[in-house]
Structures are given as C-alpha cells and as structure tokens.
C-alpha cells in the first residue's frame, strides 16, 4: 500500500497555506474607499493596508506605488521598496518600514499639488503572492472669500452695490447665496432678486475665482438690515459667511434744519 509523504514534511507547506491562503486571494490589500481628498499643500497619507497581517518579514516583500494622472493613461512610478531597499522617485515620498512590518504599506506624500491628483496604485508582493489596490486622490483648495463693503450709509432710494468675492479655490464648482436679516424678522432668509453672479474664471495656475453682486435700493424701513453672503465649496467643512450692515438716511432735511431755514428767511427777507 502506497503512503504519502510524512506529515512532518507537509507541515511547512501547510503553514504557508494557512499564512498566505491559496490562489490569487491569498493576499489582499485594503484602500480607504474609492476616493481620498487632500487639501492643496497639505501632507497626504494614501492608505494601503495588507489584510490580515500583524507582522511581516519586510526582507522578503516588495511595495511599489504608481500614479496615473486624470488626463493621461500613462502611469508614473513614485516609490519602490524591494529587498529591504527604497527607491524614491517623487521627492519626499515615504513608506514607514516600522508600519510596513505590521502590514501598513500606506504612502506618505508631503505638500501635495494640484497636478498630483489622479489614480494611485499600490502593488504589494509577499512571496509568492501579489495584490493590487487603487484609489483616486482628489486635491482641493478652499476659497478665500470676502465682502465689500462691510457697512455703508446710503440715502433712501439710493442704489447700493454689495460685492462678494471668492478666489483661490479648486475644483471649479462653487455656490454663492445671499440672505438678509431685518429687525422686524430676526431670521436669515434667502433672497434671489437683484443678484448678479459672474461666470467662474480660471487663473494661470489652475485655481478659480468668482464674484457675485447684490444690488439694493432701500427705503427707510430697511435701516439696519443685515445682508449675508454665503459661500459653499466641497473643500470646506462648513460654509463661509460674511455680513453687510445697511444704514439708511432720509432724503428730506431734519426738523431742526427746517426751523433754522425758516428763521433765516424771516430775518433776511429779499
């Protein structure tokens, strides 16, 4: 009767199967979802974790990171770790060897720029298996916004223009809305009349800017009305808001001035 190989000879192979699994599913990486966002000029950590490993021998494994730009199908190699040696092709790119031993192959990038948005690919080899994960990196820049003027004194029925500006933001889509608060109704209510919002324009460096105007022609009842410009962009954790206070003066002279004019006329007849 034929016998198979002794159990002691099969034991190393059995341990290898238990550790790495079998087939293409023996090694898996986990990314931080399908998309990661980072602010312009901030440091980014692009997540790539080797599933199910708490301790790795980094001398028998390799990590390679690639980037594919949104407008190009060409991949660029950014970082490589192989045979315990590093090759850095993007300045400052780094994978922590200490974390790598615990199965964390995340790529750290300092000072991320707009041009570095795109698809990032993490390729992990733990002999004899390979796993690949991809994630899209979005680079955003929050708007610098302001309101001009912040306060104005205008005459009754005199037209006043309020300007709200947002600049240095990315990507292009942005929302500017206007609200007002009055002493009679102390709530901020959205308004839609008298608003002109220009088309968003692109600066030479790829950033965007936009202006929005609110035209008001107040009556005396509008005195101390507060107008608010609200700017929303996907880079912001919450909207930006700026207030403008309107002070309305009458077009007729006040009573003391009228009495003075009457007295002057009686004392100096024509």
Image: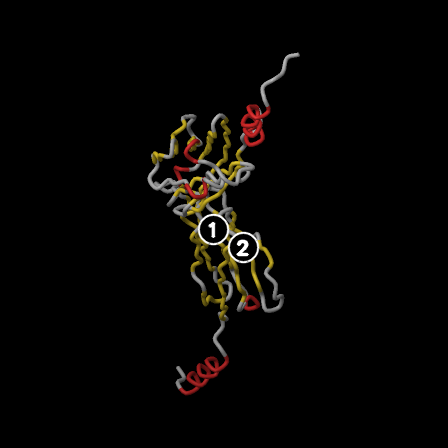
Outermost residue on the front side: it is 1
Q: Residues within 10 Å of mark 2 (few under 14, many from 20)?
A: many
Task: Mark 1 and mark 2 in contact? Answer it, CB < 8 Å.
Answer: yes
Q: Is residue 63 above or below residue 263?
A: above
- Report the residue at 49% width, 77% height from top: 254
Towards the viewer: 100 or 240? 100
Q: Position of residue 168 (x, y in %)?
A: 40, 48
Q: Position of residue 49 (x, y in %)?
A: 51, 38
Q: Which mark is residue 160?
A: none
- Report the residue at 63% width, 16% height from top: 3
Q: On the rendered structure, is 138 left or right of 206? A: right
Label 1's element? strand
Towards the viewer: 157 or 51? 51
Question: In which quadrant is the C terminus drawn?
Answer: bottom left
Q: Which mark is residue 212?
A: 1
Quadrant in the rendering for residue 76:
top left
Outermost residue on the top side: it is 1
Towards the viewer: 34 or 173? 34
Q: Position of residue 247 (x, y in %)?
A: 49, 68
- The answer to which of marks 1 and 2 sits earlier in the sequence is 2
Inspect this view and state whether residue 67 appears. no
Q: Is residue 114 above or below residue 262?
A: above
Towards the viewer: 52 or 15? 15
Q: Is residue 28 above or below residue 203?
A: above
Outermost residue on the bottom side: it is 267
Inspect this view and state whether residue 87 appears. yes
Q: Residues within 10 Å of mark 1 (few under 14, many from 20)?
A: some
The residue at which mark 2 appears reads as 178
């Amino acid at each position: 009767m034929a016998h198979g190989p002794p159990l002691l000879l099969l034991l190393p192979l059995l341990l290898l199967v238990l550790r790495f699994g079998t087939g293409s599913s023996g090694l898996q990486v986990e990314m931080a979802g399908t998309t990661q966002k980072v602010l312009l000029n901030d440091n980014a950590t692009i997540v790539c974790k080797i599933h199910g490993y708490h301790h790795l021998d980094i001398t028998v494994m390799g990590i390679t990171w690639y980037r594919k730009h949104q407008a190009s199908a060409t991949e660029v190699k950014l970082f490589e770790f192989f045979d315990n040696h590093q090759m850095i092709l993007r300045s400052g790119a780094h994978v922590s060897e200490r974390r790598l031993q615990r199965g964390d192959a995340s790529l750290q990038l300092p000072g991320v720029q707009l041009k570095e948005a795109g698809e990032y690919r993490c390729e992990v080899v733990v002999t004899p298996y390979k796993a690949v994960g991809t994630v899209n990196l979005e680079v955003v820049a929050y708007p610098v916004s302001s309101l001009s003027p912040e306060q104005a004194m205008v005459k009754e029925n005199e037209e006043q223009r309020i300007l709200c500006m947002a600049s240095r933001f990315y990507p292009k889509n942005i929302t500017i809305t206007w609200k007002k608060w009055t002493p009679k109704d102390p709530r901020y209510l959205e308004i839609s009349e008298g608003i002109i919002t220009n088309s968003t324009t692109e600066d030479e460096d790829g950033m965007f800017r936009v202006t929005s105007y609110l035209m008001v022609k107040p009556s005396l009842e509008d005195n101390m009305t507060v107008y608010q410009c609200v700017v929303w962009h996907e880079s912001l954790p919450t909207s930006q808001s700026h207030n403008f206070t309107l002070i309305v003066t009458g077009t007729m002279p006040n009573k003391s001035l009228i009495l003075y004019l009457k007295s002057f006329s009686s004392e100096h007849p024509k």
